[in-house]
Amino acid sequence: LCRLTGGPRRAPMEGTKEEELVRCPVCLRELPGAHINSHLDQCLQAGESEAKPGSSPPCKRPRLAAAPPEGEPPEARPAAAPSLASLFHKSRGGGQSLEAPGRRSGAGREEAALKPENGGSAAAGSGASLAQKLEGKPLAERLRPDTLGDYVGQERVLGSQTLLRSLLESHEIPSLILWGPPGCGKTTLAHIIANSSKKNGTRFVTLSATSAKTNDVRDVISQAQNEKRLFKRKTILFIDEIHRFNKSQQDTFLPHVECGTVTLIGATTENPSFQVNAALLSRCRVIVLEKLSVEAMEAILMRAVRSLGLQVLGQGDQHGSSATGSSSESSEPPVYIEDKALSTLAYLCDGDARTGLNGLQLAVQARLAVGKTTPCNITKSGSAAGILITEEHIKEGLQRSHILYDRAGEEHYNCISALHKSMRGSDENASLYWLARMLEGGEDPLYVARRLVRFASEDIGLADPLALTQAVAAYQGCHFIGMPECEV
């Protein structure tokens, strides 16, 4: 009975002495009880070092179960409890260990936040209708790339032969602070690092500074210390909107980033010099991501059009004549979009990929809703005429041009500096553009008027003595009248 249940038994030894034998829960070998502790440590360390991704899973040893009592049917046999070996045994195929009950915590759930859902890629298949592809998650989240090869834009930082790309491809990821405007690819880059690190056996945890607390960070760091001490496994911690953490919360990362317990990756839209501790900045490399160019936005939108199965119409094309794209095999009418509409959307979103993709999704959904309520025209061949998305539909969906501007942030000083330099270079068109952009963004006109007074006194000076008089008069007029009358 002891041999069947795996319990301790006494084996006869030479002479009259008998020593108690205990079965190892990892390799299932029977050893003397005095040596079982040291042998168990060796088995755990050997199993961790031998675990490599792609290797075949080990053969499972059949487990012996006690026979049912006589007269009782086999169906009444109780379910066999999991053996102790199943709790310690490491899966060789996936490179991830089976955790004991009670070990999983909130940080473990956060680790799967950046993992793509199964329905994300399945919904984009050819068998799903266009309405089903647009349901659920936003289009920007659904089309988030998983590899560096699919990443569009940021050639200055992630181009070929760049330092950061070489480090990411070699899985040597340092502590980073990703700084850039919304929609430039900060979270997408973290998503790519997450997929790459999980394939390499590195633990990836993501938290949001808008909802996480100091205790959540300490729990993640405690688990990272255990992973590093027991399994020699690295931990990458991604903090989205890290500027939302105050100074004391940011100080929590300092000793652990210093000693390498965690690799910190922070994403922020604010200037790290103002919002992140100087001590933490010295331990991280700041990566500046710029807003996407129009060419990059057009490439992203074309990728979205192909994934949705839309057909692009060039200039002078008719429905279905010389359209590019995959035709839908379902009974619903095909959806066409003008090439000019995509170009307009790429310009209006102002380098924000999230705004562009969500604007495209909104326009398609609106046209599909209109197509359901109106009768569909039938062509001579007997097929549906299709739904056309024009430039006017794109403008109607966005309502106004997306302008990135903040009255107290980095863009505030960038715009006023651009206005000053445009006037210094005698470029009247650029000066009017930056002035209109600041006023549309909600800037105080008195702030602009003060800069005009400074420009008249410093840059013009004695070349035109009346310039200062006109600038002061403009400032006083704005002060007396106020917005919006002072726009004249």
Image (cartoon, rainbow, N blue to C red):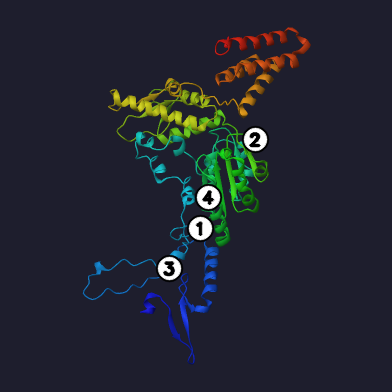
Residue to which mark 3 is pinned: 84
Residue at the right extreme of this rendering: 462
Q: At label 1, which amino acid type do we have?
A: Pro
Which is in the foreground here, disc 3 or disc 4? 3
Residues at marks 2 and 4, CA–CA distance in whole angstroms:
27 Å
Residue to which mark 4 is pinned: 204
- The front one of 292 and 408 is 408
Q: Is residue 43 above or below residue 130?
A: below
SS of the residue under disc 1: loop
* Relative side of 365 to 45, left or right: left
Earlier sequence position, callout 3 versus callout 2? 3
Circle number at residue 192: none
Earlier sequence position, callout 3 versus callout 4? 3
Residues at marks 3 and 4, CA–CA distance in whole angstroms:
28 Å
Q: At label 2, which amino acid type do we have?
A: Phe
Residue to which mark 2 is pinned: 274
Identify which residue is drawn at 39% across, 28% down. Answer: 364
Residue 261: percent from the left, percent from the top? 60, 54
Earlier sequence position, callout 2 versus callout 1? 1
Residue at the top extreme of this rendering: 466
Circle number at residue 53: 1
Q: Is residue 310 above or below residue 282?
A: above
Q: At label 3, which amino acid type do we have?
A: Leu
Do residues under tags 1 and 3 come within 8 Å of each other at their CB atoms?
A: no
- Figure quadrant of residue 2: bottom left
- Figure quadrant of residue 330: top left
Which is in the foreground here, disc 2 or disc 1? 2
Q: Quadrant of the C terminus?
A: top right
Residues at marks 3 and 2, CA–CA distance in whole angstroms:
53 Å
Earlier sequence position, callout 4 versus callout 1? 1
Q: Residues within 10 Å of mark 3 (few under 14, many from 20)?
A: few
